[in-house]
Image: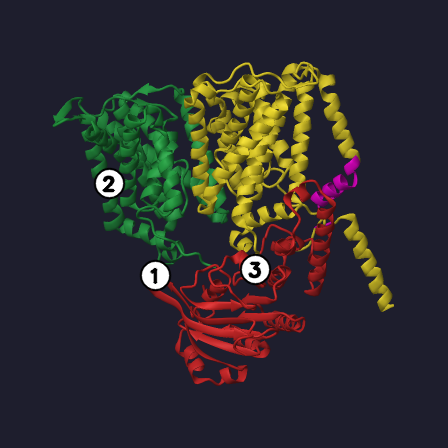
Chain colours: A red, B green, C yellow
Amino acid sequence: MADNAYLSVKGITKRFGGIVAVEQVSFEINKGEVVSIIGPNGAGKTTVFNMLTGVYQVDEGTIVFNGEEIQNKKPKHIVMAGMSRTFQNIRLFQDMRVIENVLIGAHIKTSYSFLDSTFRTARYRKEEDEKVLQAIELLKSVGLEHRKDDYASNLPYGDQRKLEIARAIATGAGLLLLDEPAAGMNPKESEELMLFIRSLKQKGYTVLLIEHDMSVVMNISDRIYVIDHGKPIAHGLPVEIANNERVIEAYLGGVHKDAEDN
Amino acid sequence: MIAQQIFNGLALGMGYALIAVGYSLVFGILRLVNFSHGSVYAFGAQMAMVFIGLRFGVIPGLIASMVLTGVLGVAIDKLALEPLRKKKSIPIASLITTIGISNIVTNLLIVAFGSEKRAFPPLFNSGTLQLGKIVVSSTQIGMLVVSLILMLILVGIVFYTKIGLAMRAAEQNPKAANLMGINVNFVISFTFFLSGISASIAGSLVGSYYQIVYPNMGFMAGLKAFAAAVLGGIGSLPGAIIGGLIVGVSESMAATVLGSTYRDSMAFIILIIVLIVRPNGLFGKKGITKV
Amino acid sequence: MTNTRMEKHSFLYQFESFISKNQKLLLILLAAFLCLLPKSVNNQYFLTVIVKMAVYAMFGLGLNILTGYTGLVSLGHAGFVAIGAYTASLCAVKLGLSFFPSMLLGMVAAGLVGILLGLPTLRLTGTYLSIVTLGFGEIIKMIAMNWSPVTNGTLGVKNIPKPAVFGMKLTIANHGLYYLVMIILIVCTVFCLVLVKSKTGRALQAIKGDELASVMMGINVTYYKILAFVLSACICAAAGALYATLIGYVDPNTFNFDVSTLILSIVILGGMGTIRGMFLGAAILIALPEVSRFLMVYRFVLYGVILVVMMRFRPQGILGWKSQLPYKLSRQVVERLKTAETEEAGDNG
């Protein structure tokens, strides 16, 4: 599967000064898979996401997405290539409405010009209407249609997570990177989230997940990669990982707490 | 000629450095550029003029001005900025608040004293010294010496006292410092007090250098000192000094080489170049974006 | 955050829905009022104050694009006003151009400088940017002072002609200038309204809300920040050109730091990120010094107090509420949603 993987990451490394945050991490994702990256706090998971999405420069290694090398490309380029993400500590546009958040997600798919919108040309009206309809459709599919007029800050926690995912989908992405979507959720909400991620998979989305909630990870992942102290220590099917000694050791030997993992 | 200009620039630059320290101290702890600092500096100079004029004598007059200006600094924090921190307002809010305060202080000074320039008494016995080709006035020597001593005292406070340790701790991580039993709000007030005092001294020194003070004097000086602080790396004390000296020297060089109308624009040119080439300044640390 | 739903019975909702239901009628009434105002008062002093308010409202609209929507605080907007005013006045006085081309040239000049000033946004955030804008305002003042062959130095430009349409001079006395300013104000307002409800407006607000998240949505943050600078500069320059012809002269001190803070105070008092707020902010702050001598003396103190008090107690500004009405959908969208619904109902039935 090596060469036709949807996302293929080879030996990426990130250093901050003298500290190596991520060292020689490699993984692959095929189209339509749900793959999880797990590891104790501070293992470098979010740093991996930041490298994938262009927030951080990659010091070594290559990232091939959809047949194109994207390491160290601009975030805009990476979004246009079809990869979009959510954030560990929700980063919605809080003062804007739910539907506006989705419309911002659709920004790169909206092609009318500044002059079109200033003079309200037919092109503007047609495309704006289209995007609004698509946004409503998308909100319907994630179960937030009744909330479309609310301000994002007024949504309950679980819905904010969903909205963030909807916003990521609106960019037209095929690969969604979800950074701890279950963080801070109660068991019922996590359950819902699981069903939701499964429904994404059925719709043909590929999902890369960072998650602490093991019940979520074990239930929905096709494959799991484990990193600890920035280094890959194991990968395999959920059953294999659950019984892997090194993984158990990393989790029990290290500090195990639910504090924020920045 | 050039040596003379460099010396003049150094003396004035120490004055800027003293103002710049005020920006750096507050920025270090609050990550806030205190726009009102220039007006606090003007306030200090005015007060020194008033107290010395009231026959307090030079030293008691200066001390009275220092205390009053320090208190003004604390008052600004307590009345306007602390409530915003408690409310966890957006950063833009404290920025705009300090702009507002600057307006209030400057214009109250104008209402009280009029906007015209007033004579400021010389703080040092007038007299000049001939050092080779350089003519040195006692005021310049006074400025250099006093500023240098003050800087050393400030560095001493920040690095070798308990409150200084608390300041540095609060700078690193206010939350953790709070948990360790440091009264962060007190530390912040103390920082404002220190920055007020240094502004007052700077105001008196620069006032005696030009022998005039006026309410709007803080505007330009504040900007130049800010440029100095940014050049040195805002938040760094040695940076503020080096920055102040560079701004002072380049200003007096520009005045002789390009003409006096260009004196005031040097600071901006330096500022813009620094911000574009090396936004963290000469001694500044680079931050990592956290996501 | 307790209120998770739109409060249908709140005063705000009632008020807003009343306005939106009677929108056409209210607009006609407003237009009639604005048209008849000069005839019915016919007081030159009063009209001058009204026109000044309108011009300051335009300054507010301009800065609002940058500060209100994009979240970049500029402390040097008097600089853009000055560029507009100087360019237009000099074109009129020295080149004999008529008002509209002069104003356009002023806008172009300010727009170009806006690009220049916007470029540091590549590297700067928050406060640093504000300081650069402050320095920018001062540099413009210095240029106006020192570039004597063009700007007449500290003497400034005098005897700026009034705009003329078909040979008729528009002045306050014949109400022409009043109508001209109102028309340009309306054009600006419509432009801002249209801007907000477009992908550009959304991108600007997204940048204000969360810059990193905006980058991750593929928004070209640099481009939009510079665009905000340019649009903001153009509007302020147009208003500046009007201001110059209104008072008849410009000199370097006409556009000092106090003007920049006044513009900022208008935006903050009225409500950052609202259009309605700019009118109220300008009306209050321009009327105050006219109302009493006490306020005249203390007005700059007052501008400062407004900034401090508003930030503390109502950072969103007097009129800075979030609309409680549903997101406005175009008629086409509403129709298509309806047909989709009936089809669904038909399928189910």
Q: Chain ID for label 3?
A: A
Is residue A101 something that shows in the picture?
no
- Towards the viewer: B172 or C222: C222
Q: Are marks 3 and 2 in contact (CB under 8 Å)?
A: no
User: Alpha-carbon distance for marks 2 and 1?
Assistant: 31 Å
Q: Is residue B135 left or right of residue C35?
A: left
Residue shown at the point (65%, 16%) measured from the top left: C171
Residue C19 belongs to the span the image colors magenta: yes
Position in image of residue B261 (x %, y %): 35, 24
| Residue under numbered circle 1 | A17
Q: Quadrant of the N terminus of chain B?
A: top left
User: Which label belongs to residue B27?
Assistant: none
Q: Which residues are magenta?
A: C7-24
From mark 3 to mark 2, how far is it between C-alphas?
51 Å
For image coordinates 43% across by 60% down, the residue present is A57
As for residue B154 lying within the magenta part, the answer is no
Q: Position of residue C278 (x, y in %)?
A: 61, 34
Label 1, secondary structure: give it.
loop
Reading the image, the residue beneath label 2 is: B151
Which numbered tag is attached to residue A79? 3
Which chain is disc 1 placed on? Answer: A
Q: Pick whichever, B105 or C159, lies toward us.
A: C159
Q: Residues within 10 Å of mark 1 (few under 14, many from 20)?
A: few
What chain does mark 2 sit on?
Answer: B
B226 relative position to C221: left or right: left
Q: Which mark lies nearer to you, 3 or 1?
A: 3
The amino acid type, in three-letter code, at marker 2 is: Met
